Image (cartoon, helix red, strand yellow):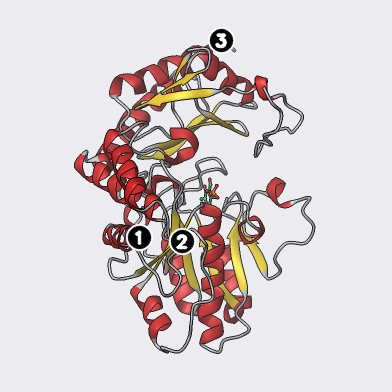
């Protein structure tokens, strides 16, 4: 195979033929070029809520391609799929009367939200408010903004200078956050926070932590941004994790599950209050937007995907998956196979007490895709996963861990 492709988050020296070459997929099953089958225990990269090859979404995409494959949404243009997708997304969000900005990737959504956070303060004349607070172990994509505000150090080093005005807080200590706000409150533009940290290792927020951040932002005039790129669209048992944890941010970023990845789409949901500030002065233009903002084919995929999530009751299904996963992990903990576990709905991880890459490889060899993060194995299956497939995941996990 050609070595032209440079893989992300991979060793550039690895040969193309040493990768697992996925050639097709249906529901929760992946098939590689040798015909080997796998359960997709990671929904690709935390994203395929409805499973693979869903005919409703595939057909919606095909129909849209025949009608209008793409057109931009910069002034003076719009298209109906983009407008309807934005409306469908806000309706299920904590800001049903807010506005929705669209992009392609989670990284674009994050960088847009960071720019918006500063924009609001600049427009209010609060020019000193530029600090963005990040949390340890947070992951916010790989654009310059998202790289700067992520709390995974290995992803930040080696690129030269990143954004200034970024301060890190521990991801589990609201008192430390309060101390920082007491010192810099008048300069803090916003806090960016994944309600459940995904790439950092499926780290749950301590009780009251998210509400504490909300309180601090309110007290000090800062904006709270929830990065729901993984958490959104049913993953934590409600449409958004903001609803699961009952804390409403000023802005939410989303991507992945909005189309289940069939076509890339992402965005930022702005509260009604922030959205109103954007329309206060009719002469001020929003000087931000991507060529593919409001891409009609991606938007058609989103509309159909949200319908599938709704019609197949996948948000409720996520809570059921959570119960099954929890009892599977509890059994492994009970017999000493794992050291601990954590998660909610359709996103989980367990600590195995040693670097997890060997176990991850053994899981994949035995036909279950999971993700190794430090000493943890992470699972984030499609929300259509059956009880028997969950059973297979746990049988395989037990077999792999007991063989160590
Ligand atoms: C919370 C979070 N934010 C942002 C991103 C970046 O998304 P993308 O890889 O689509 O740019 C990710 C990707 O995993 C993510 O998990």
Could you tell me which quadrant the C terminus lies in? top right
Q: Quadrant of residue 179?
A: bottom right
Residue 400 in view (yes/no): yes
- At a point 37% along the width and 67% down the height, the residue shown is 78
| Vertical relation: 97 (above or below) 47 | below
Sequence order check: which comes first, mark 2 or mark 1? Answer: 1
Residue 378 in the image: state x and y as whole percent. 50, 33
Say which mark, if any, is on residue 403.
3
| Vertical relation: 214 (above or below) 345 | below
Disc 1 to disc 3, C-alpha distance? 51 Å
Disc 3 to disc 2, C-alpha distance? 49 Å
Callout 2: 10 Å neighbours few (<14), some, many (20+)? many
Residue under pointer 2: 293
Residue positioned most to the left: 311
Sequence order check: which comes first, mark 3 or mark 2? Answer: 2
| Vertical relation: 200 (above or below) 393 | below
Say which mark, if any, is on residue 82.
1
Residue 253 in view (yes/no): no
Q: Is residue 328 or residue 229 the one in the foreground? A: 229
Secondary structure state at the residue bearing disc 3 = loop
- At a point 63% along the width and 56% down the height, the residue shown is 143
């Amino acid at each position: 195979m050609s070595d032209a492709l440079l893989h992300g988050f991979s060793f550039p020296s690895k040969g193309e033929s040493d990768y697992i070459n996925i050639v097709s997929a249906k529901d929760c099953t992946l098939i590689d070029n040798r015909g080997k089958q796998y359960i997709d225990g990671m929904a690709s990269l935390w994203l395929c809520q409805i499973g693979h090859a869903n005919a409703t979404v595939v057909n919606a995409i095909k129909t849209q391609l025949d009608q209008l494959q793409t057109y931009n949404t910069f002034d003076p243009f719009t298209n109906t799929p983009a407008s309807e997708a934005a409306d469908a997304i806000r309706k299920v969000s904590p800001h049903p009367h807010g506005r929705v900005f669209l992009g392609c990737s989670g990284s674009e959504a994050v960088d847009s939200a960071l720019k918006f956070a500063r924009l609001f303060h600049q427009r209010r004349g609060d020019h000193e408010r530029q600090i963005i607070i990040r949390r340890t172990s947070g992951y916010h994509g790989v654009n310059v903004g998202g790289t700067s505000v992520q709390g995974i150090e290995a992803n930040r080093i080696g690129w030269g200078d990143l954004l200034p005005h970024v301060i890190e807080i521990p991801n589990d200590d609201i008192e430390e956050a309060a101390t920082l706000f007491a010192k810099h409150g008048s300069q803090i533009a916003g806090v960016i926070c994944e309600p459940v940290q995904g790439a950092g290792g499926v780290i749950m927020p301590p009780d009251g932590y998210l509400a504490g951040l909300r309180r601090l932002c309110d007290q000090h005039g800062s904006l709270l941004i929830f990065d729901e790129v993984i958490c959104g669209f049913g993953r934590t048992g409600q449409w958004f994790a903001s609803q699961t944890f009952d804390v409403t941010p000023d802005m939410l970023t989303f991507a992945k599950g909005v189309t289940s990845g069939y076509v890339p789409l992402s965005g930022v949901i702005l509260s009604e209050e922030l959205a109103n500030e954007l329309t206060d002065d009719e002469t001020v233009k929003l000087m931000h937007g991507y060529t593919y903002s409001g891409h009609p084919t991606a938007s058609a995929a989103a509309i159909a995907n949200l319908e599938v999530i709704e019609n197949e009751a996948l948000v409720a299904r996520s809570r059921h998956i959570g119960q099954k996963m929890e009892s599977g992990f509890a059994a492994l903990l009970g017999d000493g196979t794992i050291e601990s576990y954590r998660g909610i709905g359709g996103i989980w991880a367990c600590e195995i007490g040693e670097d997890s890459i060997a176990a991850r490889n053994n899981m994949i060899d035995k036909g279950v895709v999971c993700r190794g993060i430090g000493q943890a194995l992470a699972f984030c299956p499609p929300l259509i996963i059956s009880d028997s497939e969950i059973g297979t995941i746990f049988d395989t996990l037990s077999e792999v861990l007991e063989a160590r």
